[in-house]
Amino acid sequence: MNFNQLSYWPGLVVLFAVFLIVVVIIEKRFFTFIKTYWFYNRSLFSYLSTILFLAGMGGLLLSLLDVRGPEERIKAEVPHERTIILLDTSASMLAEDVKPSRLQKAVLIAKHFARKATGHQLSIVAFAEIQKKIVPFTNDIDLIDARLDSLKNLRNQYGSSALSVAIQESIQYFREAGDDARGNIIVLTDGEETAEGINLKVPTGIHLALVGVGTENGGRIPLDDGRGFRFGYKKERGRDIITKLNENFFRKAVSDVPSGKYWIANTYSLPSEEILEFFQFEKVKSNNQQDMVIKPVLMEWIVVPSIILLILSYFFKAIRVFSLGMLLIFSPIRAQEVEAPVLTPEIVSRMDQLQQGDLNRLERVKLADDLHKAGAKEEALALYQENLKGGIDKEVPPEAYMNYGTALLEKGETQKGIGLYQKLNESLDDSAGAQKIRETMDKNIVSAFQIQEQKKKEQQQKKDQEKKKDKNQEQSGSDSKSQPQSGDQDSKDQKEKSGDQSKDEQKKQDDQEKKPEESKNEEKDKKKDQQDHGQQDQPKPPKKIPAKLKQLMSDDRQLQMKMIENGTRDLNKRKSRKSKDW
């Protein structure tokens, strides 16, 4: 196991250290606050949760270094369906020994090959001293035709051929389109020697097809002005230059290439199909199944455990919540039962003394408070009513009157409870204890009103449900009444049936009379459908190109011609007069 992006580890270490310090500081402040104000110490599960969280985050950061396994060799298919068409646009290609000219013949061969090369992605490159990629790799035949048409009328009258440089640049185009230099190159040229000579360095993955355009007798290089009028022929030392096709050039060039072949196109035949067969043969010979060395990605070995650690961290952090949820899910649910009040032995003994009459008034009020706290609210309320009659007695603690009012509110006697609270409020002073009693009474009053509103809502819901049931019953009763009686209805049904039978017989007779006419109409409809389908199956004529699109294509051709001619002129200005310019 190794890391493909090991250069990033110092930055990730610094990032993890900063993250660790921030987490430790935040958790230390949080648990200090909890211990100070809630008196809880940090649990072991909390420590374990933090450790798992930091380990999970560290693993995720480590996975960013791109974990890879050891190198492996696999079989992979390498596509060979990319083809570059190199088109010579030097001055010698203007010769007219091949009609209408060498350049126009080369354009015709390129267009014919493009239409035959189904499944190939084609790129068009025009070259002289310099090369220009006028079409990137594409299978759009319309775009290829439009760009090739822009080269037909090109007049590069001072351009020589740099074939070696053009082929080397084309190999770089393959590397730009993919990881490896593999594909096909077609060179359409007249084989005119360049000043630098021929030095082809073609790798084994490139299949080279050279197509010679011209004749061995050769021809003169015409010179035309911008309007197409011919004013002479290209000369050197006062004599007309005769450019000839040299077949020895093609033999020598092919001998230096691992996978190469040449054709001479000086007749009306076009070698497109032979070139495609050559490419296909070389593709099979080069064996598509090739060994490739890869390093498998093993990022999941770190990412998956890191995610599991983060999940466990959250689980241990909220383990109490999970435990409560599991208990609620798996523990059996039982109906809530009203628990009987639990009376302590002391309260029981005091109740015995009460029966014997041994308790005074204050002791009876204290017993009522204890019974109220223990849950025996009815007994406590009875004692309050017996011993706290009349106004507020200052000898009795005010808490007893508050408990008495609370018991009245709980029983539902809201007016009596609030009235007792008002009397008690008037009798209290401004001490701190009195203020607490007032606050407690206010809370009890609010809760009592909330309980009353909730009861009213429940009662209203019950009434609405009862009304719905009554309506459903009334509707069912009305439906039963609306059904007709059986005795009267039978006679009517028999009459209607007899009438319907007679109508059915008449319909059958009419249908029998109409069947011959309908069958004829159906046969006519079928014939029409068959004719329509036949018309649909016929191939539709090709759509015409709109006039606006034609104008755009023409403008594109003019621009391509100007760019190539201007580039050649600028380069010729920097060249010496001794160098060859055709």
Image: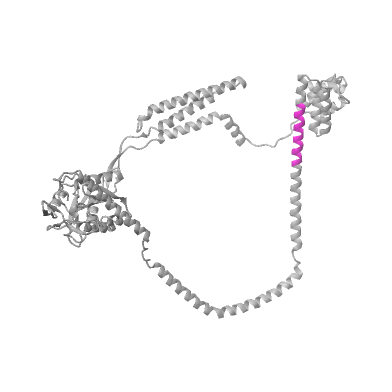
Residue shown at 30%/45% (left/top)? 177
When asked about the image quadrant of residue 462, the answer is top right
On screen, residue 212 above or below 295: below
> In this orientation, which residue lies closer to the viewer: 36 or 485?
36
Q: Is residue 246 left or right of residue 423?
A: left
Q: Is residue 441 magenta?
A: yes
Please say whether residue 399 is visible from this viewpoint: yes
On screen, residue 485 above or below 428: below
Measured as percent of width and height from the top left, residue 484 is found at 75, 66
When asked about the image quadrant of residue 478, the answer is bottom right
Which image quarter holds the N terminus?
Answer: top left
Looking at the rendering, the stretch of residues picked out in magenta corresponds to 440-457
Measured as percent of width and height from the top left, residue 415 is found at 83, 33
Q: Is residue 343 magenta?
A: no
> In this orientation, which residue lies closer to the viewer: 478 or 184?
184
Residue shown at 35%/30% (left/top)? 6
Q: Is residue 508 left or right of residue 269?
A: right
Q: Is residue 175 left or right of residue 518?
A: left
Q: Is residue 548 left or right of residue 87?
A: right
Measured as percent of width and height from the top left, residue 202 is found at 20, 45
**Colour style of the rendered protein structure:** one colour
> In this orientation, which residue lies closer to the viewer: 264 or 125?
125
Please say whether residue 42 is visible from this viewpoint: no
Measured as percent of width and height from the top left, residue 51 is found at 48, 26
When asked about the image quadrant of residue 112, the answer is bottom left
Total marks in image: 0
